[in-house]
Amino acid sequence: MTVNLTKTDMDSAIAALKKEGEERAVMVANTVCIFAPDVPASVAEDVLDGMRLMNLSANKKFDKETQQREWYNFYNDGLGKFGWTLTGAAHVEEAVDKDTHTLATLVPEIVSVQIGHNHRLNRCVKRSFEVIVKTPKAQQLLEESAASVSGKSSTVQISTCEMSPQGLPIMHMTSVQLSYDKAEKTAGATGRTLDKSNTRVYRASQQGSFSIRHFNAMREAVRLKLASQAVDILALDI
């Protein structure tokens, strides 16, 4: 990855996570994580740390383009060990029903169908991708980390996290993969109109609840492992 994320980017992202009472959006490579105002700062950090470590670990082991199922099974199994109980993850093909769709408009539309058009975080999903298109560093991070080595697929994941009425962190994760009949260039892909004749779209969706008590036992070990990794978090001003 050639995008130049700095310690300042990291510090800003961590500071954003700590803003309780506000909607927060943070990118981890090709994953856009959105937290509702009622998610405590400590919970947001725990959730993001587990996702970061599993994303890094899965990327080292598998190629999402040729080993998509293996990647997701490994990723989901790892999240389970960190305290997540997940259901779903079916990969189904989605219709591209507009000639004007871009990645930045298609992904929020797919997410809104999965979580419900009236979900309180829908606006944040849409706004996050509007910000990404207008922010060169964010757009580059997404495009470089989403694209496969061959250039024949791109995978973007969106995770929305909120608190249940019982006070448990719950999350809906949607993964969108664009598969191309011929390789696509990466730069500018987020805001570029999709070539419907060259593109197939697949979606995998999961819902999960998070056990804070379960994660307590491994929090320090996870953070120590992440401390040795490259800077990989970028906040989005939504």
Image: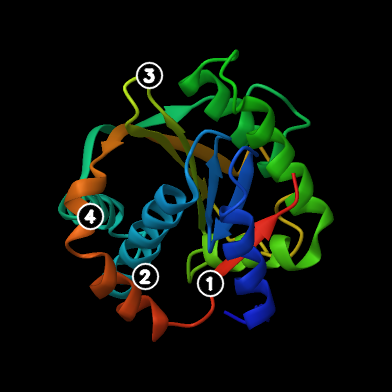
* Circle 1 SS class: loop
**Front position in the image: 113 or 222:** 222
The residue lying furthest to the right in this view is: 134
Mark 4 vs 3, N-terminal side: 3
Looking at numbered disc 1 in the image, what kind of residue is underneath it?
Asp
Q: Mark 2 and 1 residues: CB-CB less than 8 Å, in contact?
A: yes
Residue wearing tag 3? 165
Residue at 58% from the left image edge and 44% from the top image edge: 20
* Circle 3 SS class: loop
Of the numbered discs in the image, which one, if any, rests on residue 45? none
Looking at numbered disc 2 in the image, what kind of residue is underneath it?
Leu
Residue wearing tag 1? 232
Q: Is the residue marked by circle 4 packed among few (<14), some (14-19), or many (20+) residues within 10 Å?
A: some
Mark 4 vs 1, N-terminal side: 4
In three-dimensional space, the C-alpha distance between marks 4 and 1, rounded to whole angstroms, equals 21 Å
Q: In this rendering, which labeled residue sits more in front, label 4 or label 1?
A: 4
In three-dimensional space, the C-alpha distance between marks 4 and 3, rounded to whole angstroms, equals 21 Å
In the depicted structure, whether residue 198 falls above or below residue 88: below
**Front position in the image: 66 or 141:** 141
* Circle 4 SS class: helix
In three-dimensional space, the C-alpha distance between marks 3 and 2, rounded to whole angstroms, equals 32 Å
In the depicted structure, whether residue 27 falls above or below residue 229: above
Of the numbered discs in the image, which one, if any, rests on residue 56? 2
Mark 3 vs 2, N-terminal side: 2
Answer with left or right where residue 137 lies relative to residue 67.
Answer: right
Mark 2 vs 4, N-terminal side: 2
Residue at 31% from the left image edge and 75% from the top image edge: 60
In three-dimensional space, the C-alpha distance between marks 2 and 4, rounded to whole angstroms, equals 18 Å
Looking at numbered disc 3 in the image, what kind of residue is underneath it?
Pro
- Quadrant (top left, top right, bottom left, bottom right) of the C terminus: top right
Residue wearing tag 4? 215
Q: Mark 4 and 1 residues: CB-CB less than 8 Å, in contact?
A: no
